[in-house]
Image: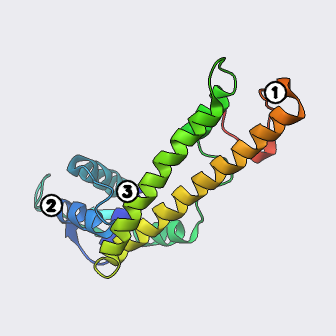
C-alpha cells in the first residue's frame, strides 16, 4: 500500500493538516490500517521535497502546518491510480513457505499441518462474515475491505485444498516422491529469490 499516494489522494480534495490527513486516511481505509502520525509527516516532507505538495509555511513543523497538492502531485496521483499493481511475481507467503519446508522435515505430518491452518482460516472467515453483517449498511469502505479479506481467505483455503491434493497424488504415484525436489521456476516469471 502506498501511503504516499493515499495522502496525495486526500490532498486532491483540498488543503489539509497532517493530523487531519492521518484521521481521514484511517477513516477511509475502514480503520484497519493504522497510520503513525510520524509516518504522515515524514511522507509529507518527502512529497514536498519532490514537488508534489506544498506547505502553507505557517508553522515550521507540527499539527498546524497545512499542505496542498501541486499539479505535479495531481499527475503523480493520476498515474498511480491508472497503473495496475505489480502482481507478476508470487508474494512471499508464510503459509506457502511452511508447507514447502514441512515437506522436507522428517516426522512432520503435512496433512495435519494443513488441516490446522485450514481450521484457523475458516475461523477467520467466520469472524469476517460477522463483521460483514455488522458493516453492510454502515460503512462502505469497511464493507469493501471485509469483502476483499473474505475473498483472500477463501483463495488461501482453495490453495490449501489444491496443494494437499497434489501432495497426496505425489505420495500415491511414488511413496518416496512426496518430497521430490522442486523445479526452479523460469526467470521470466519474475520470481524473487
**SS at badge 2:** loop
Q: Is residue 8 visible?
A: no
Do tag 2 and tag 3 residues touch (Cβ < 8 Å)? no
Residue 150: x and y in percent read 48, 63
Point out the image quarter for the N terminus: bottom left
| Viewer-closest of 81 and 184 | 184
| Residue at 56 percent of width and 59 percent of height | 154
Dot in front, 3 or 1: 1
Crowding at dot 3, Cα within 10 Å, few <14 / some 14-19 / many 20+, comes out as some
Q: What is the CA distance from the residue labelled 2 to the residue labelled 1?
A: 60 Å
Q: Which residue is mark 3?
A: 3
| Viewer-closest of 87 and 178 | 178
Crowding at dot 1, Cα within 10 Å, few <14 / some 14-19 / many 20+, comes out as few
Q: What is the CA distance from the residue labelled 2 to the residue labelled 3?
A: 19 Å
Q: Which residue is mark 1?
A: 180
Q: Earlier in the sequence, mark 2 or mark 3?
A: 3
Amino acid at each position: 500500500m502506498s501511503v504516499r499516494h493515499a495522502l496525495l489522494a486526500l490532498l486532491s480534495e483540498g488543503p489539509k493538516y497532517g493530523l487531519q490527513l492521518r484521521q481521514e486516511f484511517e477513516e477511509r481505509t475502514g480503520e484497519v490500517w493504522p497510520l503513525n502520525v510520524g509516518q504522515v509527516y515524514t511522507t509529507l516532507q518527502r512529497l514536498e521535497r519532490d514537488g508534489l505538495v506544498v506547505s502553507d509555511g505557517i508553522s515550521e513543523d507540527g499539527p498546524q502546518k497545512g499542505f496542498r497538492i501541486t499539479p505535479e502531485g495531481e499527475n503523480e496521483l493520476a498515474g498511480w491510480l491508472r497503473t495496475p499493481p505489480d502482481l507478476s511475481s508470487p508474494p512471499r507467503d508464510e503459509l506457502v513457505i511452511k508447507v514447502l519446508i514441512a515437506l522436507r522435515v522428517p516426522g512432520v505430518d503435512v496433512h495435519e499441518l494443513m488441516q490446522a491452518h485450514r481450521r484457523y482460516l475458516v475461523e477467520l472467515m467466520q469472524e469476517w462474515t460477522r463483521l460483514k453483517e455488522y458493516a453492510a449498511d454502515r460503512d462502505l469502505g469497511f464493507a469493501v475491505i471485509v469483502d476483499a479479506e473474505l475473498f483472500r481467505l477463501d483463495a488461501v483455503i482453495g490453495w490449501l485444498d489444491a496443494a494437499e491434493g497434489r501432495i497426496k497424488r505425489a505420495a500415491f504415484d511414488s511413496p518416496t516422491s512426496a518430497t521430490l525436489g522442486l523445479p526452479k521456476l523460469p526467470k521470466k516469471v519474475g520470481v524473487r529469490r
